[in-house]
Image (cartoon, rainbow, N blue to C red):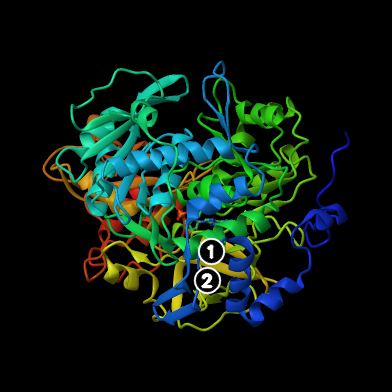
Amino acid sequence: MLAIRWVTERDEKGYFWPSEEAKKHAWVSDPNIYEEAAKDPVAFWEKRAEEGIEWFQKWEKAYEWNPPHYKWFVGAKLNVCYNCVDRHIKAGKGDKPAIIWIPEPVDEPKRVITYVELHKLVQKFANVLKSLGVKKGDRVSIYLPMIPEVQIAMLACARIGAVHSVVFSAFSADSLRTRIEDSEAKVLITADGYYRRGKVINLKQNADKAVEGTSIEKVIVVKRAGNEVNMLNGRDLWWHELMEEASDNCEVEQMDSEDMLFLLYTSGTTGKPKGVVHTCGGYIVMAYWTSRWVFDLHDDDIFWCTADVGWITGHTYNCYGPLANGATLLFFEGAPDYPEKDRWWQIIEENKVTILYTAPTAIRMFAQWGEEWPAKHDLSSLRLLGTVGEPIDEDAWLWYFKNIGGSRCPIVDTWWQTETGGTLITSLPGIGPFIPTVAGLPFPGVTADILDSEGNSVSGSEGGYLVIKSPVPPSLLRGLYKDEEKFVNTYWSEYGKEIYFASDGARWVEDKYIRITGRVDDVMNVAGHRLSSAEVENAIASDERVSECAVVPKPHPIKGEVPIAFVVLKGVEPSDQLKEELIGAVKNQIGPTAKPADIIFVKELPKTRSGKIMRRMLKALLTNKPLGDTTTLQNPESVEHLKEVTGYKG
Ligand code: WT7
């Protein structure tokens, strides 16, 4: 079969456009959609809500704006799980695969879960939660690897109105504990272990360390890897035993549009992770429509989002969005290089994946491994590629386009955040253009702008700060859990309470398309993972031999950025051993993804007159950029020493 070309040749400006076939295939191909939506965004979202989602009761008011607070579909009733599962069965799609799960061990068969089966499993597990006393509004922590029990658990929570808080399985026990404590969860769902490059990681051990002395009453354990675990009598229960006894009939809870659907913790500029609050109505409308339009998701697609379900990308595009569309999603437990560096390409070939959504860091890694790995496989089933999580450079974009997309598939570069719940800026596959390094246009109905530091809209290719204006997208976070002050300070203070400050730099391309230039706060982006400088600093500073420390990102060819720690010691001599111990502390307190790539011992840190550490200067030292004015420092004499230890070339 001759594979269809979904994009045109690159034009003189360097843009790609959808081919005629792509326009014909796409749900949206008329660029007027942007203007129409902009004329009356609230009416636009109302139409989306009506068409995409089944409601038990319609809203009285579509949008309420009391800056910096807002509500969508006020007074409406729905159930997100019903929209992701039950209605597809009613529509006759019960036998369609909802989830194709690929285990890491190559000799273990894949598991295909149809909508009917998913329905049964979700109802059973919802009854399990109920039997343990979980009620509407209660928080449930989920600390699971990439196995289908994670979607089953999330949907079961949504079914009964419980609020889930998924914690990335590679996070440490300490990270899990902090999140359990903040959310005051009653139940934790975890697994005995999981496979990672052929080894079994004992997850239950971490869970045990995390829950002691917290609000957790019951721990439900999925038997995944069969490793030896401790089961505490009266507290720990096996998933499969509970499921055996549970009835597979569980009514859905009628939820208010503005009831909380889930909490997801993310890193901010302080040491404490923030609990981002998402609600039922607005979130699912956005998850549904962005999945449908951005990926041009159709009934015959096999959609593969490679993000871990512990991140927002996993929530929206590995669970809620595709399932709300009644689509088939592929879910992979393992690593890209196990058993060989072509595992992903083999999976695409075998399962005829049509849409691949991944992160630039993965693409840069594949590019480094070499094009011979994807070349071994027939990737002609692919129709569309996506990226997310960090700015993508032109080389990586073009490598992905050529070697994975066969120069036939468009790449949608989707900008969004944990806080936005769904994609806000991207090109649409039937409209384009697809420009390397440029995210594109705000999604229809989304009002984005780029402002200078005074709050004026910038023009030309001048850079500025990305903001979102009212009417805010339906899925924008409703708050930070139990922290109103931080919510206001973080998002609604830079330009006042009517403008959402995204903490990203951006610039216009042709006064229309948006290029994202990266974070403007002390948040790093390490291999697509959001990491706060302060969190890593706290972990290092918890060692009593450390007097002070500052952590800044340094550019890295594959990971995008890596953390580098500058450490001032308290009366002890620097040593390699101490370096290892401090790196170990970060691994234990946050997780392996947060480990500093290097620790530089210094006599003192550069500080402003008000005593603030000048992180900007530390960044400049690491990248050999101009240091700027150092005379305003409290301790200008520290600069020579810093230049020396960092090997600064200026
Ligand atoms: C930050 C949000 C939501 C997806 C996963 C990350 C950066 C995200 C892009 C993109 C350039 C991007 C931003 C943003 N980011 N997508 N397409 N181009 N940068 O979610 O962990 O909440 O991180 O990721 O800096 O603020 P997150």
Q: Which quadrant: the C terminus? A: bottom left
Disc 2 is placed on an element classified as loop
In percent of width and height, residue 226 lies at 37, 18
Vertical relation: 362 (above or below) 496: above
- How packed mark 1 is, by other alpha carbons closer than 10 Å (few <14, some 14-19, many 20 or more), is many
Q: Quadrant of residue 365?
A: top right
In percent of width and height, residue 232 lies at 19, 27
Give the residue type that dot 2 points to: Lys
- The one nearer the camera, 198 or 645, is 198
Vertical relation: 516 (above or below) 264: below
In percent of width and height, residue 400 lies at 68, 42
Give the residue type that dot 1 points to: Trp
Vertical relation: 176 (above or below) 225: below
Determine whether, in the image, residue 51 is placed left or right of residue 599: right
Vertical relation: 635 (above or below) 168: below
Q: Is residue 371 visible?
A: no
Task: Tell me whether circle 2 and circle 1 mark residues in contact (CB < 8 Å).
Answer: yes
Does the beta carbon at disc 2 come under 8 Å from ligand 1? no
Determine whether, in the image, residue 30 is placed left or right of residue 171: right
Q: Residue at x 65, y 38 (%)?
A: 96
Q: Which mark is residue 58?
A: 2
Q: Which quadrant: the N terminus? A: top right
Determine whether, in the image, residue 549 is placed left or right of residue 118: left
- How packed mark 2 is, by other alpha carbons closer than 10 Å (few <14, some 14-19, many 20 or more), is some
Q: Which mark is residue 528?
A: none
- The one nearer the camera, 292 or 168, is 292
Location of mark 1 (residue): 55
Q: CA–CA distance between discs 2 and 1?
A: 6 Å
Q: Residue at x 62, y 31 (%)?
A: 344
